[in-house]
Image (cartoon, rainbow, N blue to C red):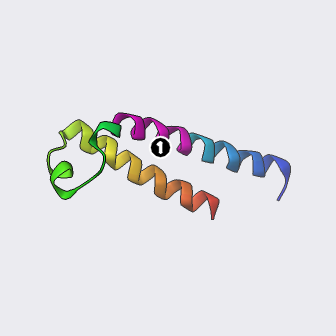
Amino acid sequence: MNKDVFQGIVDICQTHAERLHWSMQHLADKQPYTAASLYELTEIELAVFDQFIVRFSKLQDVMG
């Protein structure tokens, strides 16, 4: 793998990590996550939680 390809992968990982951090900050007051607390999330909070799940999956995919 050449240096440019590697740096591109690192950049993608950094973007996913930043989005994960943002979503974790916005949902911090909802922890610990339980069935009851997840049921009470607003539509916006559900969208943020969904972003967390998607970004976590994408980060795992990129890392291999």
- The quarter in which the C terminus is drawn is bottom right
Numbered label tally: 1
SS at circle 1: helix
- Residue appearing at x 55%, y 44% in the figure: 17
Tell me residue 14's x, y (percent).
Answer: 62, 42
The amino acid sitting under disc 1 is Leu
Q: Residues within 10 Å of mark 1 (few under 14, many from 20)?
A: many
Q: Which residue is mark 1?
A: 20
Q: Residue furthest bottom?
A: 64
Residue 13's spot in the image, x, y percent? 61, 47
Query: On the rendered structure, is 61 left or right of 38?
Result: right
Quadrant of the image containing the N terminus: bottom right
Residue 53 magenta-highlighted: no
Q: Is residue 27 left or right of residue 14?
A: left
Between residues 56 and 5, which one lies in front from this camera angle?
A: 56
- Name the foreground residue: 42 vs 4: 42
Q: Which residues are magenta?
A: 16-27
Look at the picture and state if 30 lies above or below 63: above
Residue displayed at 62% across by 45% down: 12
Q: Is 13 drawn above or below residue 23 in the view shown?
A: below
Q: Point out residue 40 in the picture as x, y percentages from the top left corner.
A: 14, 45
Residue for point 47% across, 43% down: 20
The rendered magenta stretch, by its main secondary structure, is classed as helix
Image position of 1 (left or right of 43): right
Residue at screen point 32% across, 46% down: 49
Q: Position of residue 11 (x, y in %)?
A: 67, 42
| Residue furthest front as drawn | 32
